[in-house]
Amino acid sequence: MARSKLTSKNTKSGDENDIKILLATTLISILLAAFLLNMLIQPVAAISSDETVVPEEQKPDIVRVKEKVGEKILWTPILIVTSPPRGYAKGSIQTTAKASFKLGAFKWESSGTWEWGVEDVTNGTITLLCRPAMWEMYHVYDKDRYTGAIWRDYGYHAKIKQFLTGHPYIDLDKQDDYRKVRHERKYMDYWTLWVDVTYKNQDDWVDTRGTTSTGTLKVGKHDAFGGEIDIKVKVRNYVSTGILRFDFTCSSDYYVLYKFPPGHYWDIDYLGPTKKKVWWWWKKTGPPIVAFVLRE
């Protein structure tokens, strides 16, 4: 009888264990199902402010991230004035201008205006007509929502957050040969943008040797294209590349009047896209700004 009671107790205990195991298994199944359901509905859940689904790829598990990596105040050129070595550039005090900055693979665009005219610049000096601006730098890339792995990297993109007070004329450099022109400089507490106004190709020349008269070239006539150059925005160790284009309006008949004294020869490179380097187009607008090399 004792043995029979022991067997009965063991059987009862085994049943209770089976029930506990069944309940535990059921609970685990419910939790797992809830987790999987959450994973399934995750693609349509709210996305953080710096992430958006990449619609053109039709991949709900891929999001585009715009990650801010820093900001910095930079002197930002709205206009640029170059001058012939041994000569000078006469500016128009009635000039206003608008500049557009397109940066990064997606050509993020910022813009600024200039309303203070143009001062004269002499003897190979390059002057940037600047406004201080707070620039923001972003790293743009596509990533897998779940693993965090970068799927496609678009590099760094900069844009202007806001302009600050001030409009200094900053001399970037002074050269007889614009192939040697520096690209940036520090003025007071801030650096300028990196700008490329170097001489690259001979588009034209001016020769005043054997004459006693001064040569002239009018850059810009009334509303006109002023130039298009390569630029870089640098924030910490990050760099965003792009272009600066400036257009100007002027109630006089020029934006800058270049003066070439007698006895010299200059090669000149018009700083703008090739399609603008046609004389019939310049009859109405005048050429863009110029990079110089003094030969004699």
Image (tube, rainbow, N blue to C red):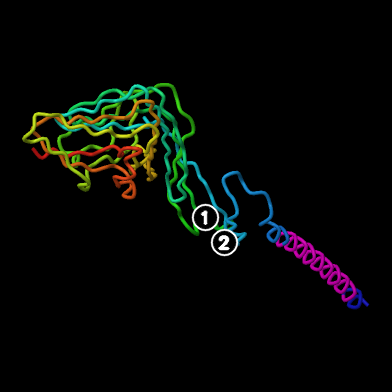
Q: Is residue 286 left or right of residue 151?
A: left
Q: How many marks?
A: 2
* Marks 1 & 2, CB-CB < 8 Å contact: yes
Q: Is residue 275 magenta?
A: no
Viewer-proximal residue, 63 or 183? 183
Which residue occupies 35% across, 26% down?
A: 252
Three-letter residue code for mark 2: Glu
Q: Residue at x 35, y 38 (%)?
A: 284
Mark 2, Cα crowd under 10 Å, few <14 / some 14-19 / many 20+, is: few
Q: Magenta part mainly helix, strand or loop? A: helix
Q: Position of residue 216 (x, y in %)?
A: 21, 32
Closer to us: mark 1 or mark 2?
2
Tell me the amino acid under the disc marked 1. Asp
Q: Is residue 30 magenta?
A: yes
Which residue sits at x=81%, y=68%? 22
- Which corner quadrant holds the N terminus? bottom right
Looking at the image, tell me whether mark 1 or mark 2 is earlier in sequence order.
2
Q: Is residue 256 above or below residue 233?
A: above
Span highlighted in magenta in the image: 7-36
Q: Inspect this view and state whether residue 236 appears.
A: no
Q: Which residue is mark 1?
A: 142
Provide residue 147's location: percent of width, then percent of height.
Answer: 56, 58
Element type at mark 1: strand
